[in-house]
Amino acid sequence: MDAVGDKTSEYLMAHDEIVKKVIDEQPDDEILYDLAELFKVFGDSTRIKILYALSVSELCVGDIAQLLNLSQSSVSHQLRILKDAKLVRFRREGKVVFYALDDDHVRTIISMGMEHVEE
Amino acid sequence: MDAVGDKTSEYLMAHDEIVKKVIDEQPDDEILYDLAELFKVFGDSTRIKILYALSVSELCVGDIAQLLNLSQSSVSHQLRILKDAKLVRFRREGKVVFYALDDDHVRTIISMGMEHVEE
DNA sequence: TCATCATATGTTCATTTCTTCATATATTCA
DNA sequence: TGAATATATGAAGAAATGAACATATGATGA
C-alpha cells in the first residue's frame, strides 16, 4: 500500500478527533505484535489443556501425555512453545522433567477467558 | 491412539494421586476447545490492533482501515471474526457501520496479556 | 561402558489462516 | 431509478501451524 498518502488526502476524516486520539493511545506495533504472539500460544486446545493441568499441579511430561491422552512428542513440542513464551518453567529431577506455570498471569488470563466463554 | 488402555497399564502412574486430582479438575473438552478458539481470535496482530483501537473508542470500518493502514477488505474480514467471537458489536448509521467492544472482558484480557508482555 | 528410560528435536505432510482482488449488497441522494 | 459511497463476502494463493514419525540427547544403574 504505497498510496496511503493519497488515501489520506482523499478521505474526509469522518471522525478526525477520535481517530487522532486512538492513534495517540495505540502502543507500538512491536508490543502489539508480541501481545498477539502471546495469545496465539493460548489459542490451541492442546496447549490450553496442558496449561489447565499445570494450573492444578506441577507435572512431568509423561504424566501430562498420559492424562491428556497425547503423544509424548506432541506434549514435548507444545511444552517448548509454552517455555519459549515464558508461560511455564521446568526443573529436572533425574530423568524426569517437571513443568509448572511460570507465573500467575497465566491463571488470570485463562480465567478471564473462561468468564467470556461461559456466559 | 487406540492403545491407551495398554499404555495405561504399562505406565507406572508415577504420580497417581496428583494425576487423578488434575483429571478431576479438568473442565470438559468442549469448554477448553471454546477457550482455545477465543484466544485464537486474540492471536493475530491485525485483530489485536483493531481491538486496541476499539478499546479507546467506537469506530467505523473506514476509520479503522485508515488509522491502522489496512485495506477495507481486510478490516471487514477481521471484524467478522471478532463479531462471531462476540468480542465486538456494531450499529449501522446510514452507510456507515460503527463497531465497538462488546464487553469489558476484552479490555481485561488484553491488559492481562499486556502485563505479561511488558515485564 | 552399555542398556534403558524420559524427554527433546528435526522433518514431513495435511490443514488452517490471512491477505488480496474482484464483486456483491446496502444506503443515500439527485 | 441510477450513481456514488461504505461495507461485506467469495475465491485463490502464500504462509503458518500442528500432528506424527523417526531419531537424538541426557540421565541412571547394572
Image: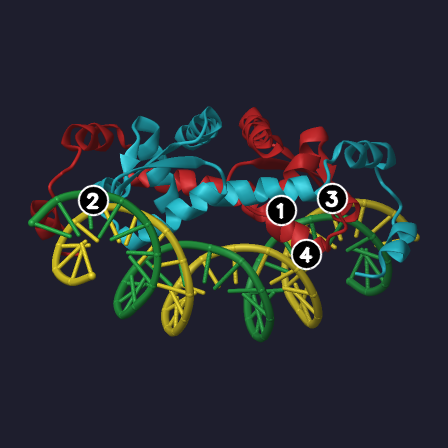
Chain colours: A cyan, B red, C yellow, D green
Q: Residue at 84% across / 35% down in the picture? A: A20
B47 to B107, vertically: above or below: below
Coordinates of residue B51 in the picture (x, y in percent): 64, 37
Q: What number of labels is visible?
A: 4
Chain ID for label 3?
B
Residue at mark 4: B73
Q: Residue at x 35, y 46 (%)?
A: A46
Quadrant hosting residue B35: top left
Q: Nearer the viewer, mark 2 or mark 4?
A: 2
What is the spatial separation of the Cα atoms under label 2 and label 4, in whole angstroms?
A: 45 Å
Q: Is the residue marked by circle 1 packed among few (<14), some (14-19), or many (20+) residues within 10 Å?
A: many
Marks 3/4: CA–CA distance: 11 Å
Q: Amino acid at mark 4?
A: Ser
- Mark pair 2, 3: CA separation: 46 Å
Residue marked by disc 3: B64
Above or below, A18 relative to A45: above
Q: Earlier in the sequence, mark 1 or mark 4?
A: 1
The reply to whether dot 2 and dot 3 touch (C-beta < 8 Å) is no
In the rendered image, residues at marks 2 and 4 fall on the same chain: no
